[in-house]
Structures are given as C-alpha cells and as structure tokens.
Image: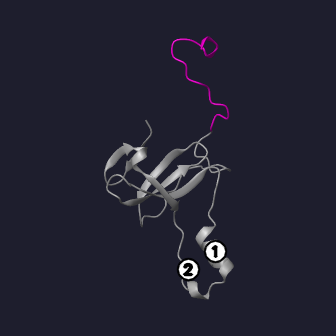
Amino acid sequence: MLSMNCPFCGERDISEFSYGHEAHIARPANPSAMSDDAWADYLFMRENPKGLHFERWVHTHGCRRWFNVARNTYTDRILAIYKMGDPPPKIDNPGPTGLAAPVDPAPRLHVVGGTEADQ
C-alpha cells in the first residue's frame, strides 16, 4: 500500500489524495498588461523535472486541505511534506538531476524463498 502523510490528518492511503499542480508559482502582479503568450506561459507551462519537484496536493477524500510536497519524480519518493505558505524545505545534496539519493538504475526484484531464476 502506498501512503502519504497529510499534515492535518496523518498517514492515509495515497488514493485519498489528488495532485494539484506545481508549487510556488507566483501570480503576475498585473495580468491585464501581459501579452497573450506571457499569460499562456503563466497558465500552462510547468516544470517537468527528473528528480526534485515541489508540488501541491489536496486531501480530496479527507480534510480537503491543500499542502505542499517535495517529491522525487524519478523514484516517486516523497522527501518532505509542508503546509501552504511555508517556504520549501532545503533538500540536502539533491545532485545534478535533483535526486535526493543515489538510485539503482536497475532495481532487482525482491524474491522471498528462492532466487529470481527459481520464479
């Protein structure tokens, strides 16, 4: 079971949550003065990194409150969860791809009671 820790409700099944969008995007001060291209970039263009990414999530089937998540998009590992309005946490040594820790490029299948060849 995959789970996520809601900062308000505690640990819950991941199916209770919904991804919102990239976190920490500031609304333009004067949107009516922006060109159509600049407005479209603000609305639709988002980062899609391999590694560290700051995201907004909502506890859809729980308290319905929004919060931020620092997640490694390569490993799908959640590195930090923090409330809206809080600054993003410093993630130690994210590396050149934003990975928080070295990742085995070819993870092995975990086999109980024998070897992979036996399966």
Alpha carbon of mark 2 to alpha carbon of mark 1: how far?
12 Å
Mark whose residue sits in front, 2 or 1: 1
The quarter of the displayed image where residue 43 is located: bottom right
Image quarter in which the C terminus is found: top right
At 46% across and 64% down in the image, what residue appears? 87
Q: Is residue 47 left or right of residue 17?
A: right
At 62% across and 30% down in the image, what residue appears? 107
What scheme was used to colour the molecule? one colour
At 42% across and 45% down in the image, what residue appears? 15
For the residue marked with disc 1, what is the amino acid? Ala
Q: Measured from the top left, where is residue 118 in percent x and y?
A: 61, 11
For the residue marked with disc 2, what is the amino acid? Pro
Q: Measured from the top left, where is residue 88 in percent x and y?
A: 49, 61
Identify the main secondary structure in magenta.
loop
Image quarter in which the N terminus is found: top left
Q: Which region of the structure is painted magenta?
A: 103-119
Q: Which element is circle 1 on?
A: helix
The residue pinned by badge 2 equals: 28
Q: Measured from the top left, where is residue 35 in percent x and y?
A: 66, 83
Q: Which element is circle 2 on?
A: loop
The residue pinned by badge 1 equals: 40
Depth check, front residue: 110 or 95: 110
Q: Is residue 11 left or right of residue 105?
A: left
Q: Is residue 87 left or right of residue 94?
A: left
| Label 1 CA crowd tier, 10 Å (few <14, some 14–19, many 20+) | few
Q: Is residue 47 above or below residue 91?
A: below
